[in-house]
Amino acid sequence: MDKRAELSSLAHSPPSEAELVHRLYDAVMDNSLWPEMISELMEYIERARASSLDADGHQFEGLVKHFQRAMKLSESFVELQEKHSTLDGVMNALALGVSVYDHAGKRIYANAAAKQGVLGHSSLIQLRRSGETRQAEPIGQELLPVLLNIAGQEIALVSASAVQPRMLPANVAYVALALPESPTYTLETIQRRFYLSSSEMKLLEAFYEWRNLREAAGNCGLTYESARTYLKRIYSKTGVNDQARLMALFDVNPVSLISGDVQVRAPQIDVRNTLTLKDGRLLEYFALGPEDGHTVLHFDALTGVTVDLIGAPQVYDEMLRDLGLRIIVPCRPGTFRSDFKRLSGLTGFTPDILELLDRFGADKATLLSQAFGSCSALAFAASAPDRVERVVLCAPSYPRHEPANWRSKDVFYIISGVIGRRAPALMKAIIPYLMRSVTQNTSKYLERHIARSNCAADIAVLSSPTLQKRIPEMLALRSMNGTDGLVQENFLNTHGWDFDLGAIAAPVHILQGALDNVSDPVGSVKLAGALPNARLHLFSELGQYLLFSEWPWVFELCAGGAPAELSTASEVPSQHLDDRVSSTTV
């Protein structure tokens, strides 16, 4: 019986501790078992609560120890994976058909696009026999690639020494590359790679077809000025600055892809900074934008890649300068290079932020948050109301609300929002292990999110090869000083609300996707109702990850503007929302 069948057969009976331990070590080796593992863990916790036992008591000590041991095993497993790395990262990032062959011509790897397309042949000999062959132009001093034409599609066959040789194992001799068979696939790939919104994608598709912005605008039902705004945002997100380079993202051939012509420009801006606080601790922060710009404090979610200042500062820099904004990301105690400090509540971070604002001479700041980061943003807004101009919360987490369908929510929500309330000691043991598991196999983690999502916009974000690459990199940076900071942050998000929402004087904009399966829309309704001056904007086709694709106009909102996109917020509450709410402005 396989593991999933075993879990399913026991689903109707509460698991014992021994069964949970057994599944935990299964999950060390196979991260795809995490949803079932968490479900069974919650059954165990619920049974403990029903037995009137203390949910934070001694009955969980054994499980805590096993989670700690599992993390050590997971760390060893990751080290082994890193030493014996595969081609998956490289292949997934290319977003085109890829087959890899050994020195005998045997195929040893093929991605999904290759297996479904003309690269479906099992050996190099079969591939050569299927197409018409010609030599291509040299790439610098590298070996000449061979171009094959199979059924009208061009394939580049390249020696392994011409494709980033340090990243390929010694048994690889040749790599075959094929462009996607249809322009639609290429468009979807670009959308996933650069987190383009549906409106931006619609314009880009028309612009690619007509090669004229006025024609494209007319076909999309946009004014020329609106089309120019969208195009400027597309330039920012893709890292290109003219029409020719933008079209090259579509028109690239396999050989030019090898030469790296279409790769996004490497970051040239150093955004990482540190501040020595009055008590001697080090506070790291990321900063980007004009020094005299209005300060935006960004409180990101757990992975820290929503507004990725470290990975792609050039994407945001021009727009921040146009809007006159300076975005600053303060790193919470124990994360990145910020020294750890034991906090009893979320407002314990406020003195550090005030010192940071004083460092920049900023009397007031706008607060921008994503998901769980909203807890810290609200804590600062309530504890330092005279220093806050406005607050923009994207898909906020509101732990005082627990949806009835929490079992169908994202794993991270269940761990932080449900287990965190019922068994905080157990959550503290789970978080480090989960972080290691996500780093170990990011693709399975994202696949789980996709499987649970019914939001096309979220699925496009979660399918991005950029996100798959950046999550483990950022988690590694975030936990470089250990996991105490991550554990404390998650604990305080549910147990550290030591402030009064009624003390928040600044206007608050809540941007909520109706299809969010992490931050429940009803929670946003309740949060808006608890704030003195809040507006809830509900977007019918967006979900948890709206800031990934909508950040350009969200930045405009942070600057005090009234972006047109706000008008697309639903005037009628989603069917998922509480019947007591009669409009999207609370």
Image: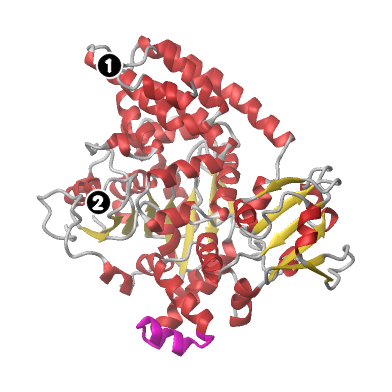
Q: Quadrant of the C terminus?
A: bottom left
Which secondary structure class fits the magenta region best? helix
> Residue 293 location in percent, x, y?
47, 68
Regarding residue 341, the answer to whether it shows in the image is: no
Q: Nearer the viewer, mark 2 or mark 1?
A: 1
The residue closer to the viewer here, 474 or 15, is 15
> Residue 582 location in percent, x, y?
11, 57
Residue 294: name its quadrant.
bottom left
Q: Name the element at disc 1.
A: helix
In the rendered structure, does residue 415 fall within the stretch colored magenta?
Answer: no
Disc 1 residue type?
A: Arg
Q: In the image, is residue 141 above or below residue 331?
A: below
> Residue 445 location in percent, x, y?
50, 40
Q: Earlier in the sequence, mark 2 or mark 1?
A: 1
Identity of the residue drawn at 41% across and 85% down? 217
The residue closer to the viewer here, 463 or 321, is 463
**Dot 2, how many residues are within 10 Å of its Cα: few (below 14), some (14-19), or many (20+)?**
many
The residue closer to the viewer here, 99 or 445, is 99
Which region of the structure is painted magenta? 210-224
Identity of the residue drawn at 54% across and 29% down? 30
Identity of the residue drawn at 76% across and 65% down? 131
**Dot 1, how many residues are within 10 Å of its Cα: few (below 14), some (14-19), or many (20+)?**
some
Task: List the residue tagged with mark 2.
Answer: 504
> Residue 224 location in percent, x, y?
41, 87
Disc 2 residue type?
A: Ile
Task: List the residue tagged with mark 1.
Answer: 47
